[in-house]
Amino acid sequence: MVSRIIPVESFDLIIFGATGDLAKRKIFPGLFRRFLAGQMPNDSKIIGAARSNLSQNTFSVLVENSIKSFAEIKFEKNDLRDFLNCLNYLQIDAAGAGGWNELKKALRPEKIRAFYFSVSPLLFGSLAERLHENEIITANSRIVVEKPFGRNLETSKQLNTILAEHFTEDQIYRIDHYLGKETVQNLMAIRFGNMLFEPLWNAQYVDHIQITVSETVGVGDRGEYYDRSGAMRDMVQNHLMQLLCLIAMEPPARFEPDSVRDEKLKVIRALDPVAPHHIVRGQYGPGSDHSDYRTGVNKSNSMTESFVALKVSISNYRWAGVPFYIRTGKRLEARKSEIAVVFKEKPHSIFGPEAGNHQNALIIRLQPDEGITMDVTIKEPGPGGMRLIDVPLDMTFSETLGIEENAVPDAYERLIMDVIRGNQTLFMRGDEVEAAWAWTDPIINGWIHRGDVPKPYDSGSAGPQDSLTLLEREGRKWREIL
Ligand code: BG6
């Protein structure tokens, strides 16, 4: 299947932090893929800005290398040359005066201006201030900011206030890259594009919901950042929270930015506080090819969690009494993100108790192997009575839709194009981020208060035993990660 490409208007994109890791791994390769797809017009201008004193040529080579390493796409030499022609480099001092005049001169008055703050949040304020002082912000300007958006409610409020001094909310694009994933958007299509599911999507029919985001990687070379964050801040407050919102929200009246974000916000505000016995934290041990968490972050007494599992409840009409079990962790047995909606048992079995218990489940696989599976109960073939078995009705999107490998845009390329189009549906609004922190803070503060020690778990396992117990004591079971 060939997807339809609608080119965006030509633009000026300024990337602050252009020599950083995110720019190298995601932003430049993503832009190049959109350029190749014909979505980014070739009279667009990309200005890389950073503190280092680099020549244009050195910067071009840097971007070329990042494309060769991370774009994962075949291309002709000419394509790369044409893309690199859209690029400029400017040495800019985020906190000082250097480079701003040159930036002002390089920008075209009539074009869309997007400023990508791919830098530490500590610099957001001075960048916004410098852009303002130098009169670079036009009505057609927008800024893109990355997570972490604060580390608690207070700091996220401070960031929102700083940005609001110079930008209106509809100019601020807060990225949560999970929202840019194809299958995460599919959650909305599955729920609101089919008659089949929505009538069953409530406490009357759903027994519980499981959300798993499991990774095989460890903290890698981000030990310092990660140890200050932990799984709760790094994954739950943002990515898993967004998945929870998309699964639990009411149908928005329209697929429009504020309609969708209003509904997500209502879910976050309806979340109950989480009781300590509904939280499991873990920290991974050594594996055959890597050291344990504490060695990895170079802190022998670290109390930071690399795994967390929670039982979450939503106090609203639709979901009262339905547990949402969510878990995420590093160094687990497989890379797998999925959501399982497990339906209730039938009120009565006409086949008698010997037919056993059977629950339908809808499993939405986010990555890898994107697709959906519906567990359906059927008769076991053969004579000898009515024995029932559960079988999967399975659809893998790439097979069904004939999608070639690498043809689906990566989350970042889609999100950057949305910034240019001015579509905020897949970006977090300020009040949404604050509400997510307001729910997360007491959980984190609670375990700091209690001096909670994360449970060790074996690398390559499904996480600490207590995580399994969290469901087992309620007569439920996590789906296998492997
Ligand atoms: C990032 C986290 O936001 O998401 C990382 O900081 C995590 O720790 C990553 O590994 C997971 O993203 P993905 O797209 O690989 O599922």
Image (cartoon, rainbow, N blue to C red):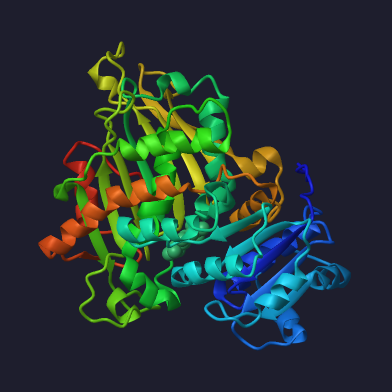
The residue at the point 36 percent across, 17 percent down is 386
The residue under the point 60% across, 64% down is 116
Task: Identify the residue shown where x is 58% and y is 32%.
Answer: 255
Residue depicted at 57% across the width and 76% down the height: 20
Q: Camera-side residue: 353 or 191?
A: 191
Q: Position of residue 174 (x, y in %)?
A: 51, 54
474 or 233: which is nearer to us? 233
Outermost residue on the left side: it is: 450
Q: Position of residue 150 (x, y in %)?
A: 38, 61
Picture coordinates of residue 240 (x, y %)?
Answer: 40, 49
Residue toward you, 35 or 49: 49
In this rendering, the answer to whether 292 lies above or below 325 is below
Residue 454 at x, y percent in the picture: 20, 64
Left or right of 38 on screen, residue 184: left
Question: Does residue 71 appear in this view?
Answer: no
Question: Is residue 282 visible from the viewing direction of this image?
Answer: yes
User: Quadrant of the rendered structure where residue 122 is?
Assistant: bottom left
